[in-house]
Image (tube, rainbow, N blue to C red):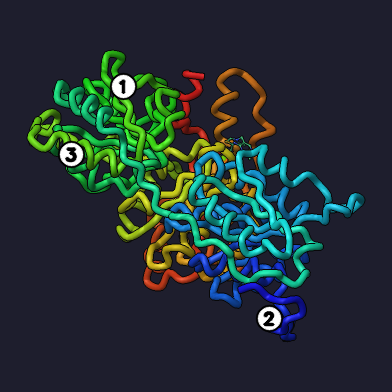
Amino acid sequence: MVLPANTESGHNGAGVTTQPTVADVVGETVAKQGVKAAFGVVGSGNLVVTNAMCRNGVQFHHARHEMSALCMADGYARVSGEVGVCSVHQGPGLTNTMTGLAEAAKSRTPVLVLAGETPAAALTSNFRIDQHDLVESVGAIADRVHSARTAADDAARAYDRAIIERRPVVLMMPIDIQPQPAGQTEPSRPPLPRLRKPVPDADAVSAAAELIQAASRPAIIAGRGAVLADAGPALEQLAERIGAVLATSAPANGLFAGLPFALGISGGFASPFAAQILPQADLVIVAGASVNHWTTKHGALIAPGANVIQIDVDPRAIGRNRPADAALIGDVAAAANALNAALKDHRNTGFRTPELQAQIAANTWRDDPYEDASTEEWIDPRTVSIALNDLLPKNRAVAVDSGHFLGYPSMYLDVPDARAWVFPNGFQAVGLGLGNAIGAAVAQPDRVTVAAIGDGGAFMALAELETAARLKLTLLVVIYDDAAYGAEVHHFGPMGHDVSCVRFPDADLAAIARAAGAKGATIRRTDELQIVEEWLINPHGPLVLDVKVNPTICAEWLEEAFRAG
Ligand SMILES: Cc1ncc(C[n+]2csc(CCOP(=O)(O)OP(=O)(O)O)c2C)c(N)n1
Ligand SMILES: [Mg+2]
């Protein structure tokens, strides 16, 4: 709708009916894209736009720090498949989001950030920074509300770009334009088509099908591209036809959960059995995965002579980390369906024998023996992870942080599907896990969400314990507390460096959680996990477990990563 100047048809959020402002229209336009939830920290540069979203049906969840607010939008987007929305103040409000924004950019999460911006003419404003270059430098897209006339179009375009370009978009909203009467209240153009499922070229499909027909023991390694394409069923159909075993990259964990020939994660977190089977493949179909050094254990999990077929929507991804013998450029589900059609008369038992199925079932991580390093004072992180896995309902989601502890939840906590797994490790930053878990818990209130984090990551995001408590989330925060930056201790200690600066006095994180309004308990033995059972009867409002893990254990996956450099 185009409004003549001074038309009285809006609401300024202060109870006064006026012509809608640019901020009103931006908030309304974003809400009308179907946004159900938004996160943020409110200042003068984003209060009006945030209220406008709320008036139009968006539920706004206020965080305590912008980095975590961004992570909440990221985690929300990862599990819901929708655009995550985050609203922040200009200048420091935006700089505070940077680490979370870089993670969302590296993990290609569609996030829309609504950020105030100092007026072009306010050259001496304290808040002034180059917001455009700042966000572009971490891989996000900078867009802008250009004028009162274009506000609705600008907002709709920014939202579309997050989906189409699969990256976070920061919509700068100059604070001198925001209060102006909007020249237009609705976008002038229809939304861009959202469904992009590019089908690979037919010749490429034939070439890949030929390689598959020549293979005797194929494997499929699926990544986040397969998750985003909902390609699990199409890939399993293909795998069954061609006799393939299935594995995922760490970010795509859960995609093949429960399937008989699923080996779990390929890479540093691979079970010893999976690591033994995967290099036996003579053909590997890499489906929406980058197959970087983490996923292949520095190349060891794909045999040097194996053929590789790589499927990716992005042509630039082909062969980036491992040369590909054939490439299918397109949506992973569309490509798998095309291969299923091309191979409709092909049948190969391949790996799929009853013997291997039984071996896979009997050789998961928890079947792998270890010497329990629990003491009076500390619990073995593997022991507590296995016990939690047994206690928690199957309908759960797990979000992790970064650090030495990271392998334990990845190896021992099962997830029912890929949307129940949040792995914000594209930037390998510590401190993003709790925010991501909160976003995931908001998106899936029917699931028990677990935030598996280290004590270092917990302290970086501590403020959000209050958020989790205030929002009464069904959230179990498991802090693998070794009173240290364990990753650094285990990396530099063996080299003879002084690591006293990355060891900390024991801290009572359960008491801190209680002070923030959550339930909290210290865990040193598995019988103390009874508190989880009690909490699960009515798990509304977070329970924080300060698990005192044995700091002397160095996880094998990390040792190996350090060895490889
Ligand atoms: C933001 C950020 N700062 C520093 C680092 C370097 N770093 C990697 S792991 C780690 C230790 C994290 O400690 P904690 O969360 O307790 O996990 P732990 O390694 O002890 O299991 C640090 C500081 C990082 N990756 N990201
Ligand atoms: Mg630690």
Q: Which mark is residue 10?
A: 2
Whole-number angstrom distance, CA of label 1 to CA of label 3: 23 Å
Q: Which mark is residue 302?
A: 1
Q: Residues within 10 Å of mark 3 (few under 14, many from 20)?
A: many
Does the residue tagged 3 have its C-beta within 8 Å of any atom of ligand 1?
Answer: no
Whole-number angstrom distance, CA of label 3 to CA of label 2: 54 Å
State the image coordinates of residue 231 (x, y, percent, origin top left).
Answer: 29, 45
Q: Which corner quadrant of the image does residue 194 belong to?
A: bottom left
Q: Is residue 560 left or right of residue 257?
A: right
Q: Quadrant of ligand 2?
A: top right
Q: Which residue is mark 3?
A: 340
Give the SS element for disc 1.
loop
Q: Is residue 565 left or right of residue 126?
A: left
- Which quadrant holds the N terminus? bottom right
Q: Amino acid at mark 3?
A: Asn
Q: Residue at x 76, y 76 (%)?
A: 5
